[in-house]
Amino acid sequence: MLRLFGNRKELCDGLTRRDLLHIGGLGAFGLALHDVLGPRQAQARPANLGPEFGQAKSCILIYKYGSPPQHETFDPKPLAPAEIQGEMKAIPTSVPGIHIGDHLPRIARIMDRLTVVRSLTHRFPLHGTVYALTGISEVDTRIESQPRNPRQWPFIGSLVDYFEDRRTGGRPSEMPRNIAVPFPMGSKNEIPPLAGPYGAMLGMRYDPTYTNFTAEGATNAPEIVSGRVFKDPFLGIRPTDRLQFGEAANQERDSARLELRRSLLAQFNHARRNLDANERTQTFTQQQQMAFSLLTSGKMHGALDFSRESTQIRDVYGMTLFGQSCLAARRLIEAGAKFVTVIWDAYGLNAGSWDTHHNHYGRLKDFLLPVFDQTFSALILDLEQRGLLDETMVLVLSEHGSTPQIDSRPRGAGRHHWSRAYSQVYAGGGMGKGNLVGRTDRHAGDVEETPISPKDILATAFYLMGIDPESTFSGPTGKPMPLTGTGVLRRELLG
């Protein structure tokens, strides 16, 4: 019998699959149905170890939804015609011969710590968040807004958590290994949340632990489309604003809810004894212990509280939601988290964030580039100063790039989706320093040298985190699944 403060659910023949589904897959504890019925066995081949294998003890992934344009960031074309180059120019960096966009001056000064790839390419010029963050083989628009669709592949952070779980034998951890800030992707605009940063076929147990942000932005952002102006927290927040754990409006834990969860845990322990007494029940017990320890521990709450940092440090990162989220990411890594994702998401309208179909120059010059320039450079230097950069990989990912040809019809002009050539930047954890990989044509429209798939980036990231990229995990039917699909380790990116 399962009791919810007096409400009863009779279990006729022990704990059945139907009962588990009825109570929501143990979502209160972060457990999925497969976690109760048995663990999936990871198959990890012995890696051909190199000096960088496992150098990254942790990872901060920055995901920029909507995709930054390569021309105004890391692949400017100063000799191209005006309709390609646009209004913004190129500046030199601390690495001779490497130039980047002129609205990234702070990043230019730390280029000797970074790896820039200019030759990313794939065939899907869509907001394929799943494609960018998982090993799935193609963009399927029918399931992009369905995180629980059984055909979805697991997020890179979820797989890191999964393999670490197997490595430690499911031993409870004091901190979640896989955390995402500042709020669940897609939850602050008018479309359903997109798939991508979820455990998917691994189950809800391996979803990131999400934080939430409920305050209003402090500053009006440049308009997305004509007449649509609103306060965007990614441009400005108040010093008193906070990230919260889960859906709570503040960090005070409701004792009644905790007692309910404790009661449920005790009753699931009782029900578990009706399951087969084998390795699967041991896994269930370990996951219960970990779930409740995360609910009651104050360590994550403390790490999220960036107000404990000095005003000087907070100002260096920038009093924006992106800035303070990156500061929180550094604090979470210091506190023991293994994989932290900072999502720079569309806010208010889906046609926002880095998706500059309209007001391209206004949003880049007055919002997107200055905020990114300040915060990203601050994060890299802060990690370096604390002795964390060599063992903390920082990835900046997005879905695609932008069209070489500027569209002058929208007010403020626009660039549109383009995936044949685009740029990204990485640092730390074994990534190269002062490293430029790949080359595009004179319009930054096609790759001329060293084409690299986004799957290759994921494979290289797994390698640096000590996971053989040719390992497999078990899919829904038990079939071995490759971690990154067709992705392969790219040694050009390494130090």
Image: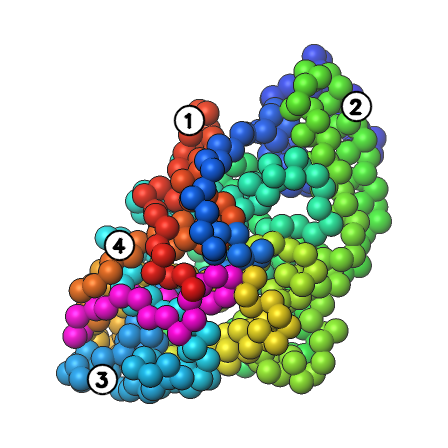
The answer to whether 425 appears left or right of 281 in the picture is: left
| Pointer 3 with pointer 1, Cβ within 8 A | no
Query: Which of the labelled discs sits on residue 399, or is there none?
Result: none
**Residue at (59, 43) in percent of width and height:** 164
396 above or below 172? below
User: Which residue range is magenta in the image?
Assistant: 422-443
Q: Could you tell which of marks 2 and 4 lies nearer the N-terminus?
A: 4
Compute the Cα span from label 4 to label 3.
Answer: 25 Å
Of badges 1 and 2, the one in the foreground is 1
Q: Could you tell which of marks 4 and 3 lies nearer the N-terminus?
A: 3
Circle 1 packing at 10 Å, graded few (<14), some (14-19), many (20+), is few
Give the x, y percent position of residue 177.
Answer: 62, 50
Q: Could you tell which of marks 3 and 1 lies nearer the N-terminus?
A: 3
Q: Which residue is mark 3?
A: 78
Indicate the secondary structure of the residue bearing disc 1.
loop
Q: Amino acid at mark 2?
A: His
Give the x, y percent position of residue 97.
Answer: 29, 82
Circle 2 packing at 10 Å, graded few (<14), some (14-19), many (20+), is some
Q: Which residue is mark 4?
A: 122
Of badges 2 and 4, the one in the foreground is 4
Compute the Cα span from label 4 to label 1.
Answer: 26 Å
Compute the Cα span from label 2 to label 4.
Answer: 51 Å
Give the x, y percent position of residue 192.
Answer: 46, 52
Give the x, y percent position of residue 42.
Answer: 51, 33
Indicate the secondary structure of the residue bearing disc 2.
helix
Look at the image and tell me in which quarter the N terminus lies: top right
Query: Which of the labelled discs sits on residue 270, or is there none?
Result: 2
Indicate the secondary structure of the residue bearing disc 3.
loop
| Pointer 1 with pointer 2, Cβ within 8 A | no
Q: Which residue is mark 1?
A: 479
